[in-house]
Structure formats: structure tokens, C-alpha cells
Amino acid sequence: MQTDLERPTAERTASALPLLYLVVALIAAIALSILTPPFLVSDEGAHAEREISMAHGYWLALHTSQGIGAPVDTNLSHVANDFRAIQDDVAARYPIARHRPDGRIPLALLVDDQKLQLSHELAFAPFQNTAAYPATLYVPQMIGWRLAEAWKLTILHSLLLVRLLTAACCIAIGWLALRLCRFDRLLLFAYLLLPTVIGLAASASQDALLVIIAALIASVVSRAIAERRTLTRTELSVETLLLAAGIMARPPYLPLALVLLLPSLQAGGRNGRRLLAPSLAIVLLTASLATWQRMEPATDSYQSTHISPDGVDPKLQMGYLRAHPVRGAVTILKGTAVLAPNLAVKATYTLGWNDIYPPWLVYGLMLLSLAGFCVLVSWNGMPSWYARSLLIFALLAVILGISFAEYLIWTPVGAHKLEGPLARYYLPLIPFALLLSSADARPWRNATARRWFLSATVAVFLAVVCTTPWVIARRYYNASPVRVLLTALR
């Protein structure tokens, strides 16, 4: 319990966090939307092609002899391919991301492409890695591309508009999640302002909304848990729709549907009528995922046609797993455990094409500030043993589900090292893990010491967040953020 001296400070801090988030997130997202080179957020070119094809009515990808994709604006594909080629060339010459040099993108390339407009002519383009995604998490982006066409913007300004609309939508949802949450707001505030999260929000990627709606889902669940009640019909309906959007975009997230049961378990309903409505919602979510996978031919096609030169073949890998189930399971479990520390660090601060990292000092300050946040809170958000166990099971099931998918899709057949997991795949799990925390701050004997520690921790964290424009400008262009801003907005 908090002391009387501590409580006013904690309450004032919690009430100020949504507004502080709004200001910092808007500034950081606008800066990153402009400074990040076109289509150089991970898979952003493929996401943009998927978005503009759906904006023209191609809701399902086409499975043709040319590949899996749909008609796309020809000029957009041209510019996306230009920047994708630069990234591929750098990755081929420097396989280790941290060895890639600064200044890999010439500022002159921005000037050359600034006058190229959307052609309003569609031609088939393959985008196999994004073809299986539904339209749900692409709504702001599709609106942005249609507005850009109507206003006859250039390709680069069109992408900037799409990024800004996506960022505005993400920040609005993040602000709402902070307002609604009943677990510790300080931890959710830190999650929403992680440079990796802000970098995704300032992009045309579907991951932008995916990592943010997870915060809103967890916040709504936290209110019911804190009030020791079940979800209302409205809450359950909204939660089911949001979960459906995330699960259909990334099927390994299906176990997260179990969080719908947490309020009922916390309220003492381990059987009977309290579990009926959320259980039906889970069945509906499972059926929705199965229906979408049957509707979208690219879902199965990706598994059968994605073959890379390094011996990756999902069908053969599945056959190997059936023949050697123990060996395959050990590879998945061991690989997940080995990669976990590295992925945890990258989840805090990774930008661009998963290869833009800050200096080690910045990483150290980020981890130090996050550790400080954890010191300030307690972890007794769900006293019910049943609810805590179910949540931990759901999180572990998702982690292993992602590892299993990457084992099939990206790991060479029979290899003993897991390949493919990326930090952003696990980011949406963080808000759900925060349900284990409590809104009551850990008691401190000295309220003044706590206040100074809190202020210092928040200051260090925000200072790290403010480094993101400099890191992007330096790593990609080897130039100052001001110079890149002036060039991009010319």
C-alpha cells in the first residue's frame, strides 16, 4: 500500500502521462515519418503495394504465374523497388546489421524521386509476404493512398501522408489505452514510447496498428479486472473485434484470445455462466481465423512456394519435424531461449529495416530507465492464481507459436539453429504481460526520494526517445536531422 505522502505524487504522475505521451509521441512520429527513407521500414514497400491494391478493390491477393500479388500503381512499385534494391545491396555486402555503414542512402536520391507522381496506372506486382494480411489494419493507409491520388501528390509526399495518418491513428489509440488502463500507467507509457514502437507507428506497415491495439485490448481487460467484474457486452464485442484484427494478421497470436477469460476468473467465476460469453467469443475468433485462411489463397501458397537458396522449404521442414519430433522441438525451444535476450534488447530500440541501432550508451540508458520503471511498481495485478496461470500460458503459447512458424518458414531443413524471429513479432505481448502489474506503486519510506527517482527515470527515458531522429538521420544519410528534413520537405 502507498503512504499518504506518496499517493498524491503517484496520482498526479499517472494523470499527466496521457498528455505527456500525446506530445512526445506526436513530435517523434512526425520526425520519423519525414526522416525515415521511403519504404525502408521493414517490408514497407510490400505493405504499400498491398494497401494501394486493396484501395482499388483487390481485397484478396491474386495467385498467378507471376507470383502472389495484385495490380499496383506502376510508379509506386518503381520507387519502392529503387529503395529496396539499395537495402538489399547493403545487406548483401554487410550481412551483420551492426557492420552496415552510415550514409547508405544518398540525399540526392530523395531529390531525384521527389517529382515522380502516382501514375494512376495499375500493373501486377508480387508482394507475397504481405498478401495474406486482411484489410482491417490497413484502413488508415488505404485512406491515405486514395487521398494522395485525389490530390495528385508525388510518391514521396503520398507515402508521407500515409505515414502521418497511420501515426495519428496509432497515437490516438495509444492515448485512449493510457486513459483506460488500470494497471500501472508508467509501464504502458514506456511501452508506447519505445523507439521501436514509435518507428513502426510512423510507417505504412500493418505492425503500426498491431502493436498499439494490443495496448488497448489489455487496458480494457485491466479495467474489468481492477473492478472485479466480467467484461460488459460492449467491452467484449470491442475486444473480440480488436483481437480478430490482430489474430487474422498474425495467426500465432490466437492464444491471446484467452485473455477474454481473465476478468471472469479474477471475479471468481471459474465455471458456469460467467465463462460462457468469453468462451463463445474465443470460438468465434478461432472460426474467423479459419475462415480467413480458407478465403485467402496466399496463406497456403506462401507455405508451399516460399523457397530460398539456403535450403528453406516449409513442406520439407514439416516432414522433417514429423520424422524427428524431439529434435525439432529441442531446436525450437533452445532457439527461442537463446534468442530471447537479444530480441528483448532489440525490442526496445530498433528502427528502419530492423538494422538501425543506437550507440551502446543509448541502449544502456534505455535499459536502465526501464529497470527504474520496474522498481517503481509492484507485480500483483491479478491475485487469482487461475487468472495469472492462464495469462502466462497464453504468452508462452504465442512465443512458441511464433518460433514454430519461423522454424517452418525461415529455418533451413534439419538445421539445429532457429532462424527468422524478429523483435517486432513479440512486441504486442508486452501490454498483456503488464496485466501482471499493479496500479498501486511499491511503498517507499521516503516520498521525496521516490519523487526524485521517478523524475530522473522519466527524464532519462524521454532523452533516449528524443535520440531517434538523430539516429535515423545519421545511420541512413550520415547527415543532421535538420538537413534531411529540409531536403525531404523541399
Image (cartoon, helix red, strand yellow):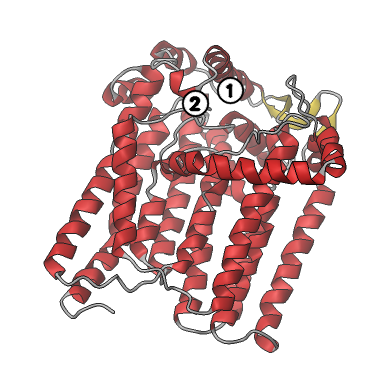
Q: Nearer the viewer, residue 261 or 78?
A: 261
Residue 66 visible in the displayed image: yes
Horizontal and vertical percent position of residue 164: 44, 41
Q: Nearer the viewer, residue 137 or 155?
A: 137
At 49% from the left and 84% from the top, the residue drawn is: 228
Horizontal and vertical percent position of residue 156: 48, 26
To which quarter of the image does residue 108 belong?
A: top left
Q: Amino acid at mark 1?
A: Ala
Horizontal and vertical percent position of residue 106: 42, 12
Task: Compare marks 2 and 1 and give the one earlier in the sequence.
Answer: 2
Q: Which residue is mark 2?
A: 38
Q: Quadrant of the N terminus?
A: bottom left
Q: Amino acid at mark 2?
A: Pro
At 42% from the left and 43% from the top, the residue drawn is: 348
293 lies above or below 52: below
In this rendering, would 119 be left or right of 215? right
Q: Which residue is mark 1?
A: 80
To which quarter of the image does residue 486 belong?
A: top left
